[in-house]
């Protein structure tokens, strides 16, 4: 089946704890996409828009060479699995500095530092023969290996200039269909760390725990609870995000390890448990996903949904209303939490649109591709809508995928476990007490 769009988040490319940092993981994703969406002898299909919902390259924990190498391989894999007409990149928290750097290149003479794009995104690359716009080379290099990488070479040789487009959209992207509008956002602005009480952030900053743990200096001047508009949300959240998830570039690994430990302990990632799926499953959405909820979780009542309602929903509705994008049927797709799953919100979200709607706000989380231990499989979800308007949530299982005589789950988990032991005992002691 051909797809209107396909969305994926939290691949964390460059990190060895990600399934998609391994060739076997990329091949399995390629094979799964072809088998689930492809038709005909060659299993070919088209994606009108590939939507990357943040934390795709992990620039905060991986070196520049790791990020470029593995992001290029990822994009090349998807490009060989399907004919992709347009790619849209939405910054996450682990790659937000990439967007900030792009905006500073573009607005070199502007004092403003943080920007909200048009909800339909900002086209960065629209001609395969040209890459001279401010910031264009930055994205072309990271995602396509410009100017001599295999992905960029393939684009130049095989793709017509009018068929290749790359856009950036921050902090959200909206796709309009005849019956429904889809909103894609990473979830940075309502993640638990960003919405933590300001007194706690300032206390950590005051006692310089941030410098002790990871040699960073977090920005605590503003708090998202004070934001009334989407523009204010970005203005208040971005400095904190950029100061906490700073670009690693080619700094020593020990610094990245300390950052990694800080992020995972604060986020309480060690407590997540999920069964290992028997195989990859494609689930169409009707009134609900009729699947085992241990595998496809139900998000209703989850902390991320509550934070979304408390810190993001009102600003989102106001923004959509201002842009004439507040339809009676809405679906939100986000990442960040790595939880995966689906949910619905009962709140009347259409009062500003002056319409009478009985349907709930649909919500999907794309999960994540990062492994935390050998007993639990991360929810590797891909969200898609076909050209007929049908919604799908693809749960990609890596059960049985092997590399170097080990399962890929064991191999990725091994790096996670090794890094936890690489952290100094005093740092582990402080963070265990702090969390």
Image (tube, rainbow, N blue to C red):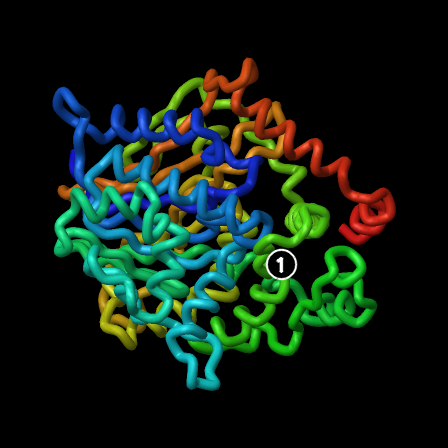
Q: Position of residue 213 (x, y in %)?
A: 77, 56
Query: Considering depth in this image, is 102 or 392 the residue closer to the camera?
Result: 102
Query: Considering depth in this image, is 59 or 219 the residue closer to the camera?
Result: 59
The residue beneath circle 1 is: 193
Query: Residue at horizontal 58%, vertical 25%?
Result: 411
Inspect this view and state whether residue 95 appears.
yes
For residue 253, side relative to residue 403 (left or right) = right
Q: Position of residue 294 (x, y in %)?
A: 50, 29
Q: Position of residue 346 (x, y in %)?
A: 39, 55
Q: Mark 1 packing: few (<14 Cα in 10 Å), some, or many (20+)? A: some
For residue 29, side relative to residue 34 (left or right) = right
Query: Residue at horizontal 71%, vertical 32%?
Result: 418
| Quadrant in the picture for residue 116 | bottom left
User: How many callouts does the rendering have?
Assistant: 1
| Quadrant in the picture for residue 205 | bottom right
Asked if residue 60 is positioned above or below residue 77 in the image, the reply reads below
For residue 62, side relative to residue 428 (left or right) = left
Query: Considering depth in this image, is 90 or 222 the residue closer to the camera?
Result: 90
Query: Considering depth in this image, is 398 or 321 the residue closer to the camera?
Result: 398
Asked which secondary structure carries label 1, the reply is loop
Query: Residue at horizontal 26%, vertical 45%?
Result: 153
Asked if residue 56 is positioned above or below residue 282 in the image, the reply reads below
Residue farthest along the front direction in this orientation? 148
């Amino acid at each position: 089946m051909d797809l209107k769009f396909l969305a994926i988040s939290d691949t964390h490319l460059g990190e060895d704890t990600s399934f998609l940092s391994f060739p076997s993981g990329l091949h399995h994703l390629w094979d799964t996409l072809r088998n689930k969406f492809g038709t005909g002898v060659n299993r070919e299909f088209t994606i009108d828009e590939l939507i990357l919902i943040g934390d795709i390259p992990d620039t905060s924990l991986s070196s520049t060479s790791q990020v470029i190498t593995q992001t290029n391989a990822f994009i090349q894999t998807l490009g060989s699995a399907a004919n992709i007409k347009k790619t849209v990149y939405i910054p996450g928290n682990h790659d937000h500095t990439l967007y900030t750097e792009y905006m500073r290149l573009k607005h070199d003479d502007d004092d403003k530092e943080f920007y909200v794009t048009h909800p339909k995104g900002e086209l960065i690359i629209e001609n395969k023969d040209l890459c001279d716009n401010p910031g264009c080379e930055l994205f072309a290099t990271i995602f396509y290996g410009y100017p001599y990488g295999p992905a960029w070479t393939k684009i130049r040789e095989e793709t017509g200039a009018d068929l290749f487009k790359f856009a950036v959209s921050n902090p959200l992207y909206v796709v309009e269909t005849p019956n429904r509008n889809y909103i894609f956002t990473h979830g940075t602005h309502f993640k638990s760390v960003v919405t933590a009480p300001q007194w706690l952030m300032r206390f950590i900053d005051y006692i310089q725990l941030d410098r002790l743990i990871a040699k960073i200096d977090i920005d605590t001047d503003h708090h998202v609870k004070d934001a009334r508009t989407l523009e204010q949300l970005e203005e208040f959240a971005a400095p904190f995000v950029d100061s906490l998830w700073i670009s690693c570039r080619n700094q020593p690994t020990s610094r990245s390890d300390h950052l990694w430990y800080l992020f995972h302990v604060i986020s309480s990632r060690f407590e997540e448990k999920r069964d290992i799926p028997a195989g990859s499953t494609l689930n169409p959405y009707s009134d609900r996903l009729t699947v085992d909820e241990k595998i496809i979780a139900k998000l209703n009542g989850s902390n991320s949904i509550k934070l979304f309602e408390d810190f993001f929903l009102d600003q989102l509705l106001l923004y959509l209303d201002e842009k004439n994008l507040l339809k009676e049927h809405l679906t939100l797709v986000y990442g960040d939490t790595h939880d995966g799953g689906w949910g619905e919100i009962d709140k009347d979200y259409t009062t500003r649109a002056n319409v009478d709607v009985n349907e709930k706000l649909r919500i999907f989380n794309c999960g994540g591709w990062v492994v935390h231990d050998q007993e639990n499989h991360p929810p590797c979800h891909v969200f898609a809508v076909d050209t007929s308007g049908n919604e799908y949530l693809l749960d990609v299982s890596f059960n049985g995928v092997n590399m170097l005589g080990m399962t890929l789950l064991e191999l990725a988990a091994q790096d996670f476990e090794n890094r936890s032991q690489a952290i100094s005992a005093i740092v582990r002691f402080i963070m265990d007490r702090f969390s």
